[in-house]
Amino acid sequence: MRGRCRAGVPGTAHAATGPHARWPLRGAAHSHNEAHRHNETVNEPIPVTRTVDHGVAKLMPDVDRKRAWLLTVDGAPQSYVDLDEPEHLEFEYARRLGHVLDVVAEPGRPLDVLHLGGGALTLPRYVAVTRPGSRQDVVEADGALLELVVEHLPLPDGAGAVLHTADARAWLEAAPADSADVLVADVFGGSRVPAHLTSVAYAREAARVLRGDGVYLANLADAKPFAFLRSQLATFGTVFEELALIAEPGVLRGRRFGNAVLVAAHRPLDTAALARLTASDVFPARVDHGPTLRDFIGGVRPVRDEDAVPSPEPPDGAFGIG
């Protein structure tokens, strides 16, 4: 069922919030021994907890979907994966990233995709199914987290994804030019986008690695007065000719802290197709571009490396497990 969880800022990559977030564990009403006997009887999956490089990770089975899992780190939801249906994107912002991936090229065409931020590899799985034959690189700073995910939620054969443990910007700076059709940035340190991934220098590296018709996507988070979000749009506007912003209207009206997807390219974006897709979601989003987006940016200056700061800390209680 699509749209059950409102996606919020991740601890490293993903999060869920709102009244529709629900993550009761399978067998949660049983005692430990009862749960153990029950699992032996029906082979029911159980949560997995492990200390990773940047916190304590937990994989929790979904109560409603047979082989679906939620990944959290230090209690913050990170990723959601359905191993039987990898094209199912549970979180709102992940669906919006998926919508962009769907319209950047004709359906089914293989792409070269660079993912900065791995989590539970939700979007690499999505690309592997929706665009078979794609070549993908996934860069995740937390090597122990990658090991946990690969061990318990392995990528299917033929996914075409190569996993790298590295800092996102350092890997990007070493990557060959004109090597990617799409770059997806979903990198969070704790619950904030790291400062070194917010500057003009970083945006130029992203543009260098992308091909001429390539598209950059980023999962960001902010709240009114949107100082961070506006600065990111101004920053990427110095490098890319076309910009779009996808977010829930309530977030853009300043009603709550939330996620927004930044899209940047050197070519026109199919904003009409994006608007149709995002409007049809259970929690609809709007697509801002052109004069509307220029008005939103206003006179905000692009971010230099020496002035860069992380994205704002989410307010207490903004995101969590319901």
Image: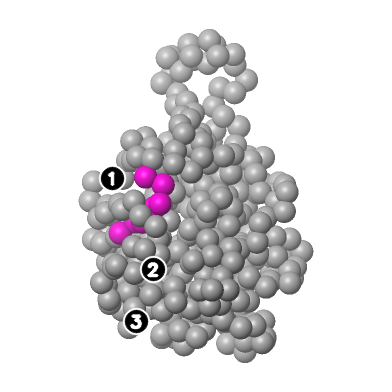
Q: Which residue is mark 2?
A: 183
Mark 2 vs 3: CB contact within 8 A: no
Which of disc 3 and disc 2 is earlier in sequence?
2
Q: Give the x, y percent position of residue 124.
A: 36, 55
Which of disc 3 and disc 1 is earlier in sequence?
1
Q: Check disc 3 and give the amino acid type.
A: Asp
What kind of element bears circle 2? strand
Identify which residue, 9 or 98, lies in the foreground. Answer: 9
Q: Is residue 144 magenta?
A: no
**Residue in view at x 35 percent, y 40 percent:** 147
Q: Give the x, y percent position of residue 57.
A: 49, 37
Q: Is residue 175 above or below residue 84?
A: below
The residues tagged by marks 1 and 3 sit, at their Cα atoms, a distance apart of 29 Å
Q: Which residue is mark 1?
A: 156
Q: Is residue 92 above or below residue 292?
A: above
Q: Which residue is mark 3?
A: 213
Q: Check disc 1 and give the amino acid type.
A: Pro
What kind of element bears circle 1? loop
Q: Is residue 118 left or right of residue 109?
A: right
Q: Check disc 2 and give the amino acid type.
A: Leu
Query: Where is residue 149, by image quadrant?
Result: top left
Q: Which residues are magenta?
A: 137-143
